[in-house]
Image: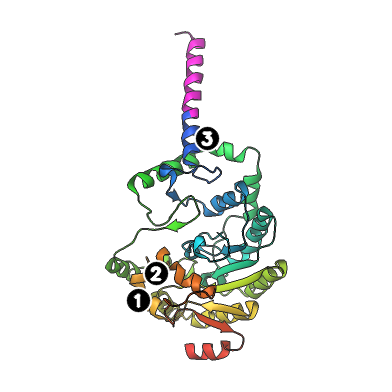
Amino acid sequence: MSFNGFLKSFLFLSIVFLSLIGSFVYFMDPFWTFNHSHKFNSIQYASNEREQKSNLLYFKEANYDALLLGSSRVTFLNQEEFKDIKVFNYSFSLAMPQEYSSYIEFAKKQNKKDFEYIIIGLDFFGSNKNVEENMNPDDIFEHINSFAYRYKLLFSIDSLKVALENLKRAIRHNYAGRSYDRHNIAYTTKIDENEVLRIVENTKVEDFIGNIKEYEFNDNLGQIFEKLKKDNPNSKFIVYTTPTSKVYLNKLKELNLYDDYKKWISISVNSFDKIINFMDYNSIIINYSKYFMDYHHIYPEYSNLIINKIMAKDESNLPKDFGKVLTKKNLEAYLKDLN
């Protein structure tokens, strides 16, 4: 074969190979930039929720009444279980309060109107000054807005890896730690209660999310909250604290962080006037092996307990001690009771 013949064959095979990769990635749509759904992309690995959920807002018509923000703990709240309002769950792993402003502004731009409600699930680790910085939101938005972004993704190695993982999960019908369907609903695999106990009891402080071992209270937290309110005067804020297992609360006491925990509660109440606190010693947290998959992620099937409480809807199936409504009037008495 002549060199020219070899070169033509090589180019032809390269084009065929790239076309196959691009077609497969398009078929699986691992970064949520297209609209098609089928059984092979019905279980989606959350490889980069910040980018993937931003893509949902950017590439699909957004018309939402409320925006839900928070960390991975909030991802398991089913946005379709909110009654009478259309909610977009814009939560992602290790979300920090200082990030919310940028993501709210991006979401409002895609929504083409202010949100009637902004719902925030607060985590204690979000008050830690020493948490490692996440990717700059502006870098994500710039990436999404770049020329031919979603078509370049079709030939990305990262996209191919995630597409293959999605295919594997769909074939095995395995949600693993966390997977999404094509409607931004998160699922996980149920774990035996005894296994949950074993996992949680063997979790080391170093493994707790948010660098709790090197905790230092962020004195700018109140200012961050006030800015959120100032920048969104047309939105009503509904704020709650995410539940964790009693093991996590016990660990805060062991690390002498309980006063910081109470300070975090106090600043949150004084900033937003009212919060619902799920992160105290209650029947759900105490019996965590039934309700949690690890020390801090509640199972999706119990997310309606949180939703019904924060939205003041049907609370008939809600344990009476799960979710304390805290205001400036009852805050001092509540904090005294914690002692």
Please report whichever mark, 3 or 2, sits nearer to the chain's N-terminal start: 3
Please report whichever mark, 1 or 2, sits nearer to the chain's N-terminal start: 1
Residue under pointer 1: 287
Question: Mark 3 belongs to which amino acid?
Answer: Phe
Residue at 32% from the left image edge and 62% from the top image edge: 191
User: Distance from label 3 to label 2 (Cα)?
Assistant: 38 Å
Q: Is residue 242 visible?
A: no
Question: The magenta stretch spans which residues?
Answer: 1-19
Question: Mark 1 belongs to which amino acid?
Answer: Asn
Q: Is mark 2 on a helix, strand or loop?
A: loop
Quadrant (top left/top right/bottom left/bottom right) for the N terminus: top left
Residue under pointer 3: 155
User: Where, by quadrant of the figure, is residue 135 drawn?
Assistant: bottom right
Q: Which mark is nearer the camera, 1 or 2?
A: 1
Considering only vertical position in the picture, is 234 above or below 26? below
Residue 17 falls inside the magenta stretch = yes
Q: Which mark is residue 295?
A: 2
